[in-house]
Amino acid sequence: MTEFVLVGGWFTGTHVWEATAAELTAAGAGAHAVALTGLDGPREDGTDLETHVADVLAVLDSIGADGRDVVLVGHDYGIHPAVAAADRRPGRVARIVHLDAGLPQDGVPALAAVPDQALRAELAGRAAGDGGVLAPPAHDEWRRWGSTDGLSDAALDRLTALAAPQPLGTLLQPLRLTGAAAALPSTAVLCTRNGVGIALVQAQVDFGDPALQALADPRVTFFELPTGHWPMLSCPADLARVLLRAAAGEGHRLTPAGTAEPPAHLRPFLLDVPERPRERTGRVDLYPADAGEPRPAVLFVHGGPVPADARPTPRDWPALTGYARYAAGEGVVAAVLDHRLHDVSDYPRAAEDVAAAVDTVRADPRVDADRIALWFFSGGGLLAADWLQAPPPWLRCLAATYPILAPLPNWGLPEGRFRPVEAVARAGALPVVLTRVGRESPEIAATVEEFRTAAGRHGADIELIDVPDARHAFETLDRDEAAREAVRHAMRSVLARLRS
């Protein structure tokens, strides 16, 4: 028989596990929800991460060691005391399940996993032992902590009513690990409505980030649930089935980087475009046009986040070099930027890189500084907000291809910036060429639809190019004529606006 030890997340007590635990026990398994000090029952002074590790260890030690497998499940914050407990009792744990949770690291406090970046910065200066607490979210504030997709009104009401203040020591005290837990089998259950799915994790592994290569270990499995951040409340039966399958060693396994065909971002561009001269200056690669007089220019802005150690870097990816060579062959100056969007917290720095690249391109004597287009891809779409918010007169067109146009639920970006859905209200007459793929993830597709709705409400000039059967990053994944024509169509539209 499998025994499941269930460790809750921010502000939540054992009540969140009631339905899931009932499903597990009905299937013949054991289920033990851990009562975390200060979150279940009276608050105690001095509660910190070590207090919660001790709470988990007490439950682990209470389960007999008579051959029963123990699966330790940690939801968001709960993964920190769960992994620490497994690190101290590796012989008692058969598997660790990261339920919509990150990868805790030795020496890093749980504060680093708080999704709200502004709140994280505010709390960073507090002391772990000051005895303070973080007030639980109000009814309409839970989205700051994760997607509430799938939660009924009654479930959200109960979550709010029973929420407890989070002791600051649990967030601020550094996690201490010996490395013993790293050798245990593990499973990640990804709640896709919260913004992350298996394909995205595989892409991050494919980028070559050394810190993520352990995710492709065969002992690591993955499941997806099409729900928000609280699956134990939104779909407890589905969650229980996934946990039982995880305990049996089932699940999707990632492909290690470099062991199969080239990853999506390194496959050939779908159009056959000739090589072009390229000049590298700092973070910008410039592809000059064959012309004596200054020509219009288009700056291509890649998506992300892309790990800092990814090689090659985006300006050498076939899709971006393909677009740049295509544009230069059509008589405009093309530029590709390597911006520093390595984490969702890096959007301000990446925006600075885009602005600096624009200055570099406009200052080149071969460029007509009054005729510039910006072309954003994927996660780079959020960087379009600054330019939509206050379009300069020299910006003749803004293009966005399979973009993310509103922050995903678990990104925690500060209010007021990097929200094209809101910025389009001030776009005025700026033409926007938007390429939408039909086989997009529902989470990203929802941001595109929000943008289109807002653009229509404010009378923005949007040209929509639909590619119904194409995927995200289709330029290196889909080689059919419809995909090729979509790229040609988008290029014609951007160049027409640059030349008008």
Image: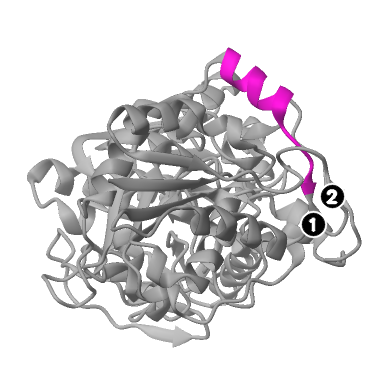
Which three-letter amino acid code belongs to the residue tagged 1?
Thr
Please state which of residues 332 and 313 is positioned toward the viewer in this rendering.
Answer: 313
Q: Secondary structure at mark 1?
A: loop
Q: Which mark is residue 44?
A: 2
Q: Is residue 158 found inside the magenta-colored segment of the image?
A: yes
Q: Secondary structure at mark 2?
A: loop
**Colour scheme shown:** one colour
Q: Is residue 139 found inside the magenta-colored segment of the image?
A: no
- The region drawn magenta spans 154-166
Answer left or right for 244 relative to 146: left
Which three-letter amino acid code belongs to the residue tagged 2?
Glu
Identify the residue under disc 1: 47
Give the position of the C terminus as an image quadrant.
Answer: top left
Q: From the top left corner, tell me how far across and down residue 368 is, in percent.
A: 52, 65
| Residue under the point 73% across and 58% down | 170
**Mark 2 vs mark 1, CA separation in Å:** 6 Å
Q: Which quarter of the picture shows residue 203?
A: bottom left
Please state which of residues 86 and 148 is positioned toward the viewer in this rendering.
Answer: 86
Q: From the top left corner, tell me how far across and down residue 200 is, in percent.
A: 34, 55
Please tell me how crowded label 2 is: few (under 14), some (14-19), or many (20+) other residues with Cα within 10 Å.
Answer: few
Q: From the top left corner, tell me how far across and down residue 140 is, in percent.
A: 70, 25
Answer left or right for 339 relative to 199: right
Vertical side of 73 occupied by 333: above or below:
below
Vertical side of 489 occupied by 25: above or below:
above
| Residue under the point 62% across and 76% down | 176
